[in-house]
Image (cartoon, grey):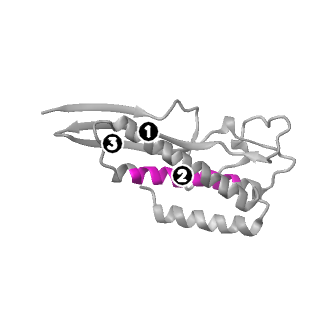
């Protein structure tokens, strides 16, 4: 009987706020310094972190994993002279989008049959998800004009709420 175990993680993470459907961001969570000559009104630093263990037994890899979305207060900032509650809602949706992609990653990990090259395979899934996430976040900003297009912002609010509901906590 062959038994191997692997442990992996995504990166060192600063103290972050774990996404929680019952907790919404407040401006007090944005503790970073506004960069000189900053153009945006605010910036949300959020992302996905993962850990996993993989066990190889009888040529089959069993993966146990945890994937979470985090908000990073020290890297997130806002300019209080130009920000509104609408801006805060826009920034919250960036965090919600990170959670949506954390769920997508969980789903991909569940559906994948891994080989003994599990470390590289998990890393590839993570990199693919991060690319999709970055593209999606950019699309969100452009379509909503960084929260200034109220109609599009409302559409995105509904779109992400529906996607999170459909994806449920997996």
Q: Main secondary structure of the magenta part?
A: helix
Residue 83 lies, with reference to residue 165, above or below; the image says: above
Q: Which residues are magenta?
A: 91-108
Residue corresponding to mark 3: 64
Q: Position of residue 112 (x, y in %)?
A: 34, 50
Q: Position of residue 97 (x, y in %)?
A: 58, 54
Q: SS at mark 1? A: helix
Question: Which circle marks residue 123 in the picture?
Answer: 1
The answer to the question of whether label 1 and label 2 lie on touching residues, with beta carbons closer than 8 A, is no
Q: Position of residue 2 (x, y in %)?
A: 16, 32
Residue found at x 19% / y 32%: 3
Q: Quadrant of the C terminus?
A: bottom left
Alpha carbon of mark 1 to alpha carbon of mark 3: how far? 15 Å
Residue corresponding to mark 2: 99
Query: Quick one: label 1, few (<14), some, or many (20+) residues within 10 Å?
Result: some
Query: Quick one: label 3, few (<14), some, or many (20+) residues within 10 Å?
Result: few
Report if residue 103 lies within the magenta region: yes
Q: Position of residue 91 (x, y in %)?
A: 69, 52
| Marker count (numbered) | 3
Q: SS at mark 2? A: helix
Q: Quadrant of residue 31?
A: top right
């Amino acid at each position: 009987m062959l038994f191997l175990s692997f442990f992996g993680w995504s990166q060192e993470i600063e103290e972050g706020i774990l996404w929680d459907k019952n907790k919404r961001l407040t401006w007090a969570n944005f503790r970073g310094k506004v960069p000189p000559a900053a153009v945006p009104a605010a910036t949300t630093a959020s992302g996905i972190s993962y850990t996993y263990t993989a066990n190889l037994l009888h040529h089959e890899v069993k993966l146990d994993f945890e994937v979470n979305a985090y908000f990073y207060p020290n890297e997130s900032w806002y300019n209080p002279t130009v920000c509104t509650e609408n801006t805060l809602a826009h920034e919250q949706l960036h965090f919600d989008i990170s959670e949506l992609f954390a769920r997508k990653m969980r789903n991909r990990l569940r559906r994948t049959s891994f080989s003994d090259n599990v470390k590289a395979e998990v890393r590839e899934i993570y990199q693919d998800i991060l690319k999709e996430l970055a593209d999606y976040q950019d699309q969100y900003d452009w379509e909503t004009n960084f929260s200034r297009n109220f109609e599009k912002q409302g559409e995105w609010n509904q779109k992400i709420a529906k996607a999170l509901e459909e994806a449920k906590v997996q």
